[in-house]
Amino acid sequence: MPRPIISFAIPCYNVADYVDTCVESILAGCSEYLGAIEIILVDDGSVKDDTPAKLDVWGARHPDIIKVIHQENGGHGQAVNTGLANATGTYFKVVDADDWLDEKACKRVMPKLAQFSLTQAPIDMVLTNYVYEKVYENKRTAIRYLNVLPRNKQFSWGDIGVFMPSQNILMHSVIYRTQLLRDIGLTLPRHTFYVDNIFVYVPLPAVRSLYYMNVNLYRYFIGREGQSVNEQVMISRIDQQLRVTRIMIDAYDLSSDIKQPRLRRYMENYLLMMLVICSVFLILSGREDALEQRDAIWGYLKNRSPQMYAKIRKRFLGRGVNLNGRYGNFTIKRGYRVTRRIFRFN
């Protein structure tokens, strides 16, 4: 039996109200390739609704396309791990169960993936745009890479431009070659939110070939109650954000491990973004130990790589989130509110 072109892994945890839309969007977008895709529905111990039964219905309806796996709750990262372990496609994409894919964009992406999968050396990473969908506000913001990445041709890290703060490569925008993720032994931590940052950051140095399509493929639902990017939820889970950031710091000493200058600069900016997020949400939390924890995460980087610490600490954002006192707290909070209004990320 031929290898599927792509495996879509869908982590599912109490998402009965959303998962149908997600699965239907993939089936519609891949309608011409239904014999060459697989959808892996990972029930991560759902107990609050009928998610497990609903997934089984999908599996029974499309047994040649959809795999359903039930597991004890291990968190989003473990659900992705399970999806990757069971994937047989040349390519691998994670689609969260409350998000969906754009049908027209998918119909443009699939022929390219099919083409790449037939070559002796398939492209390592395919990139597309994604859209913040604020459904309840009827607003949307598309994140594109037109000024950063060459379009519709193979390229390498030496060909990329400078990413704006809103243009980081996120899980929503990336399709990885499955074997690349396996070759580097990618494993996400259990019972931890925000592991999508590890998913897109750690494999980057292993990527040798890239391809960018200017299509708005991934639709990222923003505004669901209890969502991980909800401001109050992020504040409550700041310790998990800190854990993820430490894992990313440990992954590489960027100053010595990453030889490609443009990739190194991009990864520096990504790591700075993570440190800024930690710093800002610690301040927003009002915790008594907020400043102590902020200094600790920056100190963790300093101990791991003094050279990298000095380099990104002196950048504008690095200086800004390390301000102290009442004025410092005001500036940090104000900067966050302005940025949130501009980029609409939560």
Image (cartoon, grey):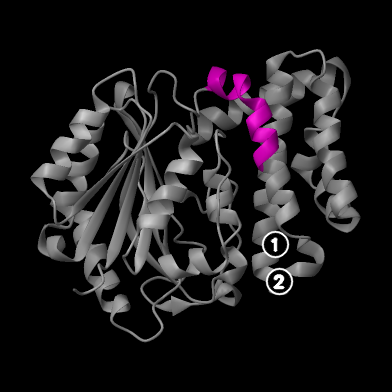
Which residue lies at the image location 44% right of the left edge and 31% below the top edge? 73
Query: Which of the two residues, 126 or 121, is positioned nearer the viewer here?
Result: 121
Quarter-of-image position of residue 131: top left
Horizontal and vertical percent position of residue 98: 32, 33
Q: Which residue is mark 2?
A: 261
Q: Is 220 displayed left or right of 51 in the figure? A: right
> Which amino acid does the dot numbered 1 rest on?
Arg
Q: Is residue 149 above or below residue 304?
A: below
> Which amino acid does the dot numbered 2 rest on?
Pro
Q: Residue furthest bottom?
A: 120
SS for dot 2: helix
Query: Which of the two residues, 216 or 175, is positioned nearer the viewer here?
Result: 175
Q: Which residue is mark 1?
A: 265
Horizontal and vertical percent position of residue 34: 13, 60
Task: Decide if residue 125 is in sight here.
Answer: no
Q: Is residue 256 above or below residue 191?
A: below
Which residue lies at the image location 28% right of the left edge and 19% below the top edge? 49
Q: Residues within 10 Å of mark 2 (few under 14, many from 20)?
A: few
Horizontal and vertical percent position of residue 231: 55, 21
Asked whether disc 2 touches disc 1, contact meaning CB atoms under 8 Å apart, the reply is: yes
Q: What secondary structure characterizes most of the magenta part?
A: helix
SS for dot 1: helix
Q: Which region shows up in magenta?
A: 231-244
Task: Decide if residue 311 is in sight here.
Answer: yes
Classify the position of the N terminus by image quarter. bottom left
Magenta stretch containing residue 293, yes or no?
A: no
Quarter-of-image position of residue 220: top left
